Image (cartoon, rainbow, N blue to C red):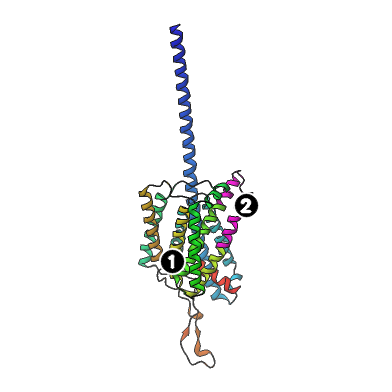
Amino acid sequence: MAMDGIREENMTNSTFDNFITERVGHNASKLSDIRDPFLTTYLVGILVSICGNFIISVSLNIQKYAHMRQSLRSSEPYYTSVLWWCGVVLMGVGELGNFAAYGFAPASLIAPLGCVSVISSAVISVVFLKETIRASDIIGGTLAVTGTYILVTFAPHASTHITASLVQRYAMSWAFLIYGFIEVLLFCILLYLYKVSKMKHIVIVMLLIALLASLTVISVKAVSGMIKESVKGYMQLTYPIFYVMLVVMVASCAFQLKFLNQAMRMFDATEVVPVNFVFFTASAVIAGIVFYQEFYGLALLNIFMFLLGCLLSFLGVFLIARNRPKIKTPDRNFIAMGQIPGRRQTDKVQPESTYGSLAAKLCTGSEKIEDS
């Protein structure tokens, strides 16, 4: 009897050990399966964003080249050029890539990666459009690339699975309600200063755009994430919050474009591009922290290095965009004022070029609105 009891107990212990081993092994495998998709999703978001920004830079320089060629060959509007439309299509592809990237990676990482477009545009304009390369371009590009590497390394690596119920809960949280109230209050004050008091300072206009950009980032990530979950089989498009975020995304983008075009008409592109990049990135990071809680549980070292990466990217963009030289056009684009009846001046006047490689996107949008 004693031997039977010992044998039974040993069998029970062996069975329990096998059960624990199986469970631990299963959980270890499951944790590995969970971690790998997180890392894969994170890398996909980064690659899609980088590719999207690179395509945007290519499209901007194609549009710029189309403008230059059109001005040399004929007086027809630029939108009659097939090459210009190819650039527009490429820009749409790049923006679609950026939109998709928000569904895979944290918003606080995707927004700063916009500096890839600035770097690529500067390189393409030097290589293919024969613009002059400067020491500040090399230093700025080095700083921006270094900052981008630090951002990718130390940014939050886990992206939340965006669902309609999660977006609803975040939208009703006290943190976002307070943040939204402060943002609306600041927007009203800045709008009063800009419209009523006629204070046309670049910081005021860029802050208006940045406040709208924070809503754009929140809504774009929400819409992109819910579409991604729907494609995976978890339908999210039947929830009202999806259409609320869709309306917010479209409206905020439209008003951003409006203020951005006004800024391009009032200020030089070399001022607007870097300031807009800095303000947009800062607002996107803050929106990601407040709404999506992307820095929750992140180590202090990671936060510090992430901010350092942002700072290096900002400095790099400022150096690249600072005092960009204008492209020299052939002499036949000059109009001799002495040849015009009733004019005594013999100076030559060159039509002003507003298509700097770093601000082509902004300027193109401005001219489209003015032509319409």
Foreground of the two, 194 or 35: 194
The amino acid on which the numbered mark 1 sits, given as a three-letter code, is Val
Residue 242 screen position, x and y as percent: 60, 52
> Which residue sits at x=52%, y=55%?
218
Instruction: Using the image, tell me which numbered label, if any, was put on residue 92.
Output: none
Residue 138 vs residue 189, the one in the foreground: 189
Does residue 86 sit above or below 242 in this rendering? below
In the depicted view, which residue is nearer to us: 309 or 132?
A: 309
Q: Is residue 353 left or right of residue 237?
A: left
| Magenta highlight on residue 243 | yes
Mark 2 closeness class: few <14, some 14–19, many ≥20 residues within 10 Å? few
Task: Give the secondary structure at mark 1.
Answer: helix
Quarter the C terminus occupies: bottom right
Which badge, 1 or 2, comes first in the chain's sequence? 2
In the rendering, at what x and y percent does residue 100 appear?
A: 54, 53
Q: Residue furthest right?
A: 238
Q: Which residue is mark 2?
A: 240
Mark 2 residue type:
Pro
Q: Position of residue 215 (x, y in %)?
A: 52, 59
- What is the magenta range? 224-252
Residue corresponding to mark 1:
275
